[in-house]
């Protein structure tokens, strides 16, 4: 989950902090009954304005309300030392947001009230006659047409809470995780044919910036725009690396367009950040592997011969990566730092500058390409760790491999949304099915 400060103006749920609409009786995210509990006063979420931050007290993190107004223009911001993950370092630190940095890993409650069951376990709803559905929370109430239990008001699991898809020999799985109230990740998959008749596989994974406006919409728009751009350009003869660059630009335009939609969005929340997300993608042909990214989602190469070394093919747009590149810290030291997940690149109308990264490789042996968000690689950060989790038959059972990798993240704690796509290399001939 990529993160930036919340600057909300809308009323929020006192249980899970989901924005509310006027007249809501229940929270659309967690089902909290709003008719009997007034909103909590005196909440102070973290605000970031031009490099200064005011941290929230621990008791405020369990239920965010409308934040206080930001300091007047020109007013000095109080100094702050580096705090817990998700806070902003002092202006003199190497990660000063003056260079354009978003911060990940906010302090969070251990559990969200009324959260849905473990998404790996299918809801065991009581069988009823007709099309009626039974609530997965109380197991007694009937679910209405809007997706809420008529007995307890609990919102039912949404379609995006857990998604699985196969497209030819490429597959992906995305899961809400165990701690978040919604899934803000998205992916796009596809397979096509190059002008010479050889196959090409496409996988794009996006991670919404959680405290931006509509991060789930941003990730979905970016993944669709990028994958559609690639699938349109490759059959026309575009070089895969150039096609990847153009796909990232198209994804950026799609996310930027969300800043003006709907027409009333800015009127109701004029101080919220624009929709934003990170993006990582891969194109695999019969002899070429191309990757592209903006942000801290990653691509890993895992050879079928496990005696050969695996590799990470992307470099994070993050504070930790900058420290390593500058020679100021080792990779282990940088990623152990509480500022490690401050991202320095993203897609969105408030991005300082769009800098798509692309790279091409020609592996000399078969293997699989793992395209994932940090919800997975936080639990298998090194390439060797990722290779240990990838099943030996991943190339012929990509969906099973993706399921195993998501399960690994959930078993590790599932603190974030988890999304992974698995692409075999080389791309098998069109029409070749999975074993």
Image: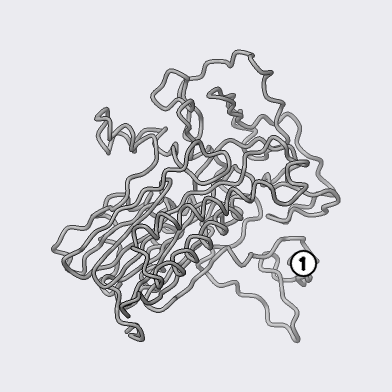
Residue ID at (48%, 38%):
353
Q: Position of residue 176 (x, y in %)?
A: 54, 58
Left or right placement of residue 92 versus residue 125 in this view = left
The image quadrant that residue 14 belongs to is top right
Q: Residue at x 21, y 58 (%)?
A: 310
Q: Nearer the viewer, residue 316 or 221?
A: 221
Q: Which residue is mark 1?
A: 146
The quadrant of the rendering that contains the C terminus is bottom left
Q: In this rendering, would 284 be left or right of 269?
A: left
Determine crowd level at label 1: few under 14, some 14-19, many 20+ residues with C-alpha closer than 10 A.
few
Image location of residue 369, percent across then percent down: 31, 64
Closer-to-camera residue (64/153): 64
Above or below: residue 294 compared with residue 53: below
In the rendered image of this protein, does residue 311 appear above or below residue 126? above
330 left or right, relative to 398:
left
Q: Nearer the viewer, residue 250 or 84?
A: 250
| Residue 372 quadrant | bottom left
């Amino acid at each position: 989950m990529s993160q930036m400060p919340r600057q909300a103006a809308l009323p929020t749920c006192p249980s899970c902090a989901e924005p509310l609409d006027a007249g809501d009786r229940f929270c659309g995210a967690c089902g909290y009954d709003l008719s009997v509990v007034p909103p909590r006063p005196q909440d102070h979420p973290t605000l970031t304005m031009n490099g200064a931050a005011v941290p929230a007290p621990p008791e405020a993190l369990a239920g965010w309300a409308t934040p206080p107004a930001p300091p007047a223009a020109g007013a000095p911001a109080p100094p702050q030392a580096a705090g817990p993950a998700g806070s902003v370092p002092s202006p003199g630190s190497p990660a000063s947001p003056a260079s354009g940095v978003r911060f990940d890993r906010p302090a969070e409650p251990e559990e969200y009230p009324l959260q849905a069951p473990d998404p790996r376990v299918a809801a065991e709803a009581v069988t009823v006659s007709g099309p009626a559905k039974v609530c997965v929370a109380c197991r007694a109430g009937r679910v209405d047409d809007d997706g809420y239990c008529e007995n307890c008001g609990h919102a039912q699991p949404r379609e995006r809470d857990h998604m699985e898809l196969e497209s030819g020999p490429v597959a992906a799985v995305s899961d809400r995780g165990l701690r978040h109230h919604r899934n803000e990740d998205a992916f796009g998959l596809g397979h096509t044919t190059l002008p010479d008749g050889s196959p090409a596989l496409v996988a794009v994974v996006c991670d919404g910036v959680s405290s931006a406006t509509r991060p789930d919409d941003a990730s979905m728009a970016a993944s669709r725009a990028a994958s559609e751009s690639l699938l349109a350009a490759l059959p026309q003869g575009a070089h895969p690396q150039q096609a990847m660059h153009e796909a990232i630009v198209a994804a950026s335009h799609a996310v930027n367009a969300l800043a003006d939609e709907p027409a009333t969005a800015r009127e109701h929340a004029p101080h919220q950040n624009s929709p934003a997300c990170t993006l990582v993608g891969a194109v695999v042909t019969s002899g070429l592997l191309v990757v592209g990214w903006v942000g801290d989602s990653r691509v890993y190469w895992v050879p079928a011969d496990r005696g050969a070394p695996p590799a990470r093919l992307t470099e994070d747009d993050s504070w930790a990566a900058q420290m390593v590149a500058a020679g100021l810290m080792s990779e282990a030291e940088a990623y152990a730092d509480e500022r490690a997940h401050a991202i320095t690149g993203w897609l969105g109308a408030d991005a300082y500058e769009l800098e798509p990264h692309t790279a091409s490789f020609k592996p000399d042996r078969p293997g699989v390409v793992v395209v994932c968000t940090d919800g997975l690689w936080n639990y298998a950060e090194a390439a060797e760790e990722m290779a240990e989790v990838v099943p030996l038959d991943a190339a012929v059972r990509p969906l099973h491999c993706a399921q195993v990798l998501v399960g690994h993240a959930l078993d590790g704690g599932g603190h974030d949304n988890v999304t992974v796509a698995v692409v075999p290399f080389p791309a098998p001939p069109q029409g070749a099915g999975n074993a």
